[in-house]
C-alpha cells in the first residue's frame, strides 16, 4: 500500500486535500523498480485546472503505454500547502507513487499561459531542483518544457534544460529511447543534452548565445555547439486519427474545471484571425475521422462514468463532419442522460438547431465572439464576421427561445479609435434591440446581453507580433470609456459590461514577447513572493513592479514600441512552417483593413502546405 507524502494532520488542515493524494480512477500504477524511465508530468497550476488539460492526458497515456516508462502527475500546491511544505521541508511529490519529484528522470512542464511562470519556479524550488539549468547535476531530473508558450521560450531559457517545440506525439519516443541508452552506458548531463539537441523539434537553450544592439534589440542569436541547429522546426502530427488518445482518462475525485469526456475533433484553424497565436502555430488544420470519434465517445464514457461530452477544437463549426458527429451523439447518448457541450461554434442556423437539441434553452446562454465592435476593426483583425451575420444569428437565437447572450470583445487592438471602442456598446445594444423586435407576446421576458472585453496582447508568430501595447492606465481608460457608452444605450437595462484586469495584461505582454533578460524579472518576482499570478486573490502587481525596478528591466521597451520590420525577435530561431513574410504581409493587410479569405476559400501561401497534409491538400490528387 502506498504511503502518502502528507500525513493526516496536514491533509485535514489544508483546502481540498484530494488534490494531493492520487489514486484516482484510471490513474496508472507501475512498479518503479521495473521501469527504466520515470517521468513527472507537471501542470503548474492547481489540480482542478491541470486535470482539465487534454494535452497532459494524451502524453500521460502515451508514455504509460511504454513498458519501460512510468509517467506520473504533479501540480502546483495551493498557497496553504506551499507554506506548510516550506516550513516542514517536505519535497514536492508526484501523485501516483507519492515519491519526490527529484527522484525522477524527467520533469516535464506544460507552459500554457505566461501568468504561470512564477509557478514554474515554485515547482522547481519545492522539488529541491536548482532553478538554473546551469547549476544542475546528474542527480537532477532533466527539466523539459512544452506547450504554446514554448514558442517563445526565451524568458524561461535559464530554467529549462530542453524545450519541446510542437506536438508531443512525434519525437518524444526518440527522446526517451535516447535517454535510456545514455542512462545505460553513462555519460555527463552535457553529453545527453547534446544528443537531445540533435533531435528535430528540441531546443536546448545552453547551446545558443544572444547578443544585443545598443538600443536593446537583438543583434544575433547563434548556436555555440555543432549539435545545435540554427533553426528548430516545430513537430506536427499529420494523421491525427492514427495517434494515441486516452481511452481511459484519469477521473478526478473532486470537480475539475472541465469534468467531462473531451473529443478533440481537429487541430488547427482555417480562419486566420490576426491576433490569434493558436490559429498560426497549429497550422495546418487536420481533422480526426468521424468514425474514430464515435468509437472514442462510446469507450471513454464507459471507462469514466462522466455525464458530459465536449467537442474540442479552435473552431468546431469548421469540422467537415460536424453534422454527422453531432447527430450521432444526440441519437446515441441524449436519452441516456449524457449532456453534449459544443463550444467554439459560429452562431448559424445549423448550430442553433443543434444547440436547441442539446441544451436547456431556458437556462443556457449563447456565446458570440465578435472581438471588435466596429466592422472596420473586425476587418483589421480578419475576424471574417459581419454585423449582419451577428444580428441574424442573434435574431435566430432569440426566435428559437434564447434570452441570454454573451459577447466577447478585445480592447487595445492595433489602429483602434475611440469610435471603434464605443461601437462595442452600440453593437451590444443593437443585439438587444433585435430581441425587442420580436412581438411582445412571443418573447420570454427581458433579454440579458453580457459583454466582456479582454485587453489585446500581441503574441509571437502572429501578424500582430509587430504591434505595440499600452500602459495599464490606458487600458483602464479605454474600458471606462466603453462602460460610459453602455450607460448611454437605449436598452441599457438589458446590458451588462465586464472587463479584464489591465495590470495582468501588461505583465503578460512583457513575458509573451520577452527575451532572456526577462528571466531575471520572473526570478526576482518569485523571490519577492509572487505566485499564482493568474488568480485574483494571489496576484501582487506591486511586487512585480518592484521586481522590474530591482532588475532595471524596462516594461516600455517590451510593450510600448512598434517593432521594426526586420527586427530580430527572440523566437525567430523557431520554424513553425508559417513564414515570417506571410505574417508581415498580413500585418500590412491589417493596416489597410483588408480581409484575407479562410484556408478553404483560398490558399494564402502561408507556408504550412510544406507539411504536406491537412486542409492544405484537401481536394487535391
Image (cartoon, grey):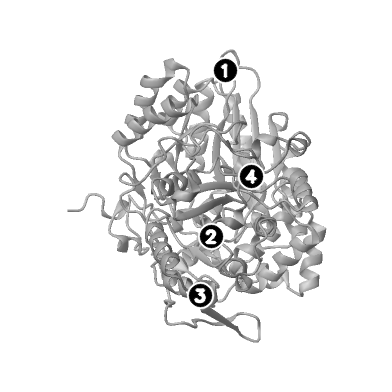
Q: Is residue 375 visible?
A: yes
Of callouts 2 and 4, which one flags the residue occurring earlier in the amino acid sequence?
Answer: 2
In this rendering, position of residue 104 left or right of residue 291: right
- Callout 2 touching callout 3 (CB < 8 Å): no
Of badges 4 and 3, the one in the foreground is 3
- For the residue labelled by badge 3, is the local secondary structure a helix, a strand or a loop? helix
In this figure, which residue is indicated by the disc labeled 2? 145
Image-quadrant location for residue 317 = top left
**Residue at horizontal 34%, vertical 31%?**
294
In this figure, which residue is indicated by the disc labeled 3? 190
> Closer to the camera, 36 or 383?
36
Of callouts 1 and 2, which one flags the residue occurring earlier in the amino acid sequence?
Answer: 2
- For the residue labelled by badge 4, is the local secondary structure a helix, a strand or a loop? helix
Picture coordinates of residue 371, whole percent (x, y): 57, 47
Of callouts 1 and 4, which one flags the residue occurring earlier in the amino acid sequence?
Answer: 4
Label 2 packing within 10 angstroms: few (<14), some (14-19), many (20+): many
- Callout 4 touching callout 3 (CB < 8 Å): no
Q: Which mark is residue 424?
A: 4
Of callouts 4 and 3, which one flags the residue occurring earlier in the amino acid sequence?
Answer: 3
Amino acid at each position: 500500500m502506498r504511503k502518502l507524502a502528507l500525513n493526516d494532520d496536514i491533509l485535514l488542515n489544508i483546502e481540498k486535500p484530494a488534490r494531493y493524494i492520487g489514486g484516482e480512477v484510471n490513474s496508472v500504477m507501475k512498479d518503479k523498480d521495473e521501469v527504466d524511465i520515470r517521468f513527472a508530468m507537471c501542470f503548474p497550476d492547481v489540480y482542478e485546472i491541470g486535470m482539465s488539460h487534454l494535452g497532459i492526458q494524451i502524453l500521460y497515456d502515451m508514455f504509460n503505454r511504454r513498458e519501460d516508462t512510468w509517467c506520473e502527475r504533479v501540480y502546483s500546491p495551493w498557497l496553504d500547502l506551499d507554506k506548510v511544505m516550506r516550513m516542514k521541508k517536505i519535497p514536492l511529490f508526484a501523485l501516483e507513487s507519492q515519491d519526490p519529484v527529484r527522484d525522477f528522470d524527467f520533469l516535464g512542464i506544460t507552459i500554457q499561459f505566461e501568468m504561470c511562470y512564477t509557478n514554474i519556479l515554485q515547482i522547481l524550488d519545492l522539488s529541491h531542483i536548482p532553478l538554473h539549468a546551469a547549476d544542475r547535476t546528474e542527480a537532477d531530473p532533466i527539466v523539459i518544457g512544452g506547450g504554446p508558450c514554448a514558442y517563445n521560450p526565451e524568458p524561461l531559457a535559464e530554467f529549462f534544460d530542453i524545450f519541446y517545440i510542437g506536438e508531443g506525439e512525434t519525437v518524444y519516443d526518440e527522446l526517451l529511447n535516447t535517454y535510456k541508452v545514455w542512462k545505460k552506458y553513462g555519460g555527463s548531463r552535457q553529453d545527453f543534452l547534446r544528443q537531445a539537441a540533435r533531435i528535430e523539434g528540441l531546443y536546448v537553450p545552453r547551446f545558443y548565445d544572444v547578443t544585443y544592439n545598443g538600443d536593446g534589440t537583438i543583434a544575433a542569436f547563434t548556436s555555440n555547439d555543432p549539435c545545435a541547429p540554427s533553426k528548430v522546426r516545430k513537430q506536427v502530427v499529420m494523421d491525427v486519427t492514427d495517434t494515441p488518445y486516452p481511452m481511459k482518462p484519469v477521473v478526478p475525485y473532486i470537480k475539475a474545471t472541465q469534468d467531462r469526456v473531451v473529443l478533440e475533433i481537429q487541430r488547427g484553424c482555417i480562419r486566420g484571425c490576426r491576433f490569434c497565436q493558436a490559429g498560426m502555430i497549429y497550422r495546418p488544420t487536420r481533422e480526426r475521422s468521424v468514425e474514430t470519434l464515435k468509437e472514442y465517445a462510446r469507450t471513454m464514457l464507459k471507462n469514466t462514468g462522466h455525464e458530459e461530452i465536449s467537442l474540442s477544437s479552435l473552431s468546431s463549426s469548421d469540422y467537415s463532419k460536424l453534422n454527422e458527429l453531432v447527430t450521432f451523439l444526440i441519437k446515441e447518448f441524449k436519452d441516456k442522460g449524457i449532456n453534449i457541450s459544443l463550444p467554439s461554434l459560429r452562431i448559424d442556423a445549423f448550430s442553433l438547431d443543434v444547440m436547441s437539441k442539446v441544451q436547456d434553452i431556458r437556462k443556457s446562454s449563447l456565446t458570440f465572439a465578435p472581438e471588435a465592435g466596429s466592422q472596420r476593426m473586425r476587418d483589421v483583425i480578419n475576424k471574417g464576421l459581419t454585423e449582419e451575420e451577428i444580428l441574424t444569428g442573434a435574431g435566430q437565437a432569440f426566435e428559437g427561445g434564447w434570452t441570454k447572450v454573451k459577447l466577447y470583445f478585445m480592447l487595445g487592438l492595433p489602429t483602434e479609435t475611440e469610435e471603434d471602442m464605443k461601437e462595442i456598446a452600440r453593437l451590444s445594444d443593437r443585439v438587444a434591440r433585435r430581441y425587442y423586435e420580436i412581438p411582445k407576446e412571443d418573447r420570454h421576458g427581458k433579454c440579458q446581453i453580457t459583454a466582456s472585453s479582454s485587453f489585446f496582447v500581441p503574441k509571437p508568430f502572429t501578424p500582430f507580433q509587430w504591434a505595440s501595447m499600452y500602459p495599464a492606465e490606458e487600458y483602464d481608460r479605454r474600458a471606462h470609456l466603453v462602460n460610459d457608452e453602455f450607460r448611454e444605450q437605449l436598452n441599457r437595462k438589458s446590458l451588462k459590461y465586464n472587463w479584464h484586469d489591465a495590470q495582468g495584461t501588461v505583465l503578460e505582454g512583457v513575458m509573451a514577447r520577452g527575451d532572456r533578460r526577462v528571466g531575471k524579472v520572473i526570478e526576482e518576482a518569485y523571490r519577492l513572493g509572487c505566485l499564482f499570478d493568474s488568480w485574483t486573490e494571489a496576484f501582487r502587481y506591486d511586487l512585480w513592479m518592484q521586481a522590474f525596478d530591482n532588475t532595471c528591466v524596462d516594461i516600455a521597451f517590451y510593450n510600448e514600441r512598434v517593432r521594426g520590420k526586420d527586427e530580430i525577435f527572440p523566437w525567430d530561431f523557431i520554424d513553425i512552417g508559417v513564414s515570417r513574410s506571410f505574417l508581415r504581409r498580413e500585418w500590412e493587410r491589417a493596416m489597410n483593413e483588408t480581409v484575407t479569405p479562410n484556408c478553404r476559400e483560398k490558399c494564402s501561401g502561408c507556408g504550412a502546405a510544406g507539411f504536406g497534409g491537412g486542409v492544405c491538400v484537401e481536394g487535391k490528387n
